[in-house]
Amino acid sequence: MSQPLRFALIGTGRIGQVHAASIHRSGDAVLQVACDALIAGAERTAAAFGGRAISDPLAAIRADDVDAVIIASPTPTHVDLLEACLDAGLPALCEKPIDLDLARVDAIRSRARQAKAPVVLGFNRRFDPHFAELRRRVQAGEIGRLEHLAITSRDPEPPPADYVPLSGGIFRDMAIHDLDMARSFVPDIVSVTAVGLRQFDTGIAGHDDFDAAVTTLVGSGGESIVITNSRHSAYGYDQRLEAFGPDGLLEVGNVTPTIVRSSTGASSSTGEPYRRFFLERYREAYERELAAFIATVRGETVAGSPGFEDGRAALVLADACEVSAREGRTVSVDLS
């Protein structure tokens, strides 16, 4: 049996806690270092999940007892920390997006391409077992050639108001997951048409952002993908996927705690509420993401695991969505 991989976790906020918990549950990983500029967060994480707490991310990356790094710190730090991992020859799992500025991403692109240690992007939804099974069956030809993909992604409620100005906007912050999901089915997207909407959040215009969006992508083979996003959903976390082809339809619906249904004189076929938190919906996806990263670090080939180029491509598409929504036109894209 291989020894558990020793991790440095940089960033112990909400997403950092998700990764710390996944490491803790894994038999193939151990949290060696918890790092946060706010040392109290690092100390709480180390107390809960093990390891030592520090505040200097470069010290975490350069530690001689660390085998791999998870970057879960704020987006503006990602490029510098990835560069430090490349300097140290350490494998890195970096949360999305790589950066909000494509030029900064492109500045380290050649280094990331040439690196011997893997760089993996945190598009965890690729590892959701339901979505992964649908993709496998599409690739196996069950519905014939894919003609249309429909992705629905609605959050239960908007993010905190103070986060919105820092987020990069709905396309770079929220829809980027769905843009990557689209590319996991249709890698070569050639055009983007997006509509940004202000439907319910009275303060969103003040941040020059949108609270909902509808995006249409076209693949080089004529495939169409429609992504529906909203920052609120009264009935819980709405995450659905539909693939259509000449031989049929494949669907993934929303996940509930159980599949028990109730029919009474007051209502028919009523089920339990949908999950209301992304971690509840995607806990298994995060665990599978970590397992795939560990396998990649150990030299195994993991089909569909998103790398640096996938992170860059998703940002290119998000930028194109932004231009399309603001200028009211279709934008051609080149992901090469």
Image (spheres, rainbow, N blue to C red):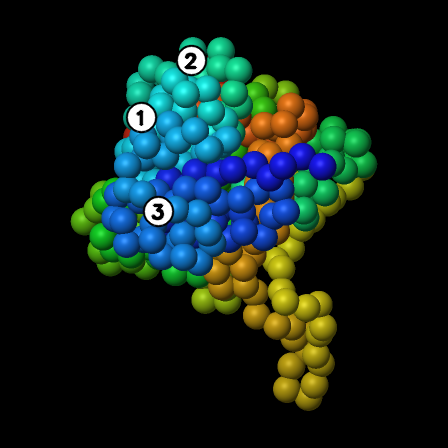
Label whose residue precedes the other's in the sequence (1 or 3)? 3
Could you say which disc has been placed on residue 80 in the image? 1
The residue shown at (58%, 28%) is 297
- Which of label 2 and label 3 is nearer to you? 3
Q: How many marks?
A: 3
- What's the amino acid at mark 2? Arg
From what the image shows, is residue 264 above or below residue 129? Answer: below
Q: Residue at x 57, y 70 (%)?
A: 273
Residue most extreme to the front: 64
Q: Amino acid at mark 1?
A: Asp
Neighbourhood count class around disc 3 (C-alpha, 10 Å): few under 14, some 14–19, many 20 upward = many
**Callout 1 crowding tier (Cα within 10 Å): few <14, some 14–19, many ≥20:** some
Considering every residue shown, the one lying at the far left of the view is 206
Q: Amino acid at mark 3?
A: Ala
Q: Is residue 11 left or right of residue 234?
A: left
Question: SS of the residue at dot 1?
Answer: helix
In the figure, residue 127 lies in which quadrant? top right
Residue, disc 2: 111
Give the mark nearer the N terminus: 2 vs 1: 1
Measure the alpha-carbon separation of dots 2 and 3.
Answer: 30 Å
Q: Residue 193: tell me if it is visible.
A: no
Please name which of the two marks, 1 or 3, marks the residue nearer to the observer: 3
Q: Quadrant of residue 102?
A: top left
Residue 286 lies, in percent from the top left, at 56, 46
* Residue 291 image point, x, y percent: 62, 40
Which element carries disc 3, helix, strand or loop? Answer: strand
Rounded to the nearest whole Å, what is the CA distance between mark 1 and mark 3? 21 Å
Above-or-below relation of 93 to 278: above
Q: Would you name the residue on which mark 3 appears?
A: 53
Q: Earlier in the sequence, mark 2 or mark 3?
A: 3
Residue in view at x 49 percent, y 63 percent: 276
Q: Residue 204: image x %, image y %?
A: 25, 51
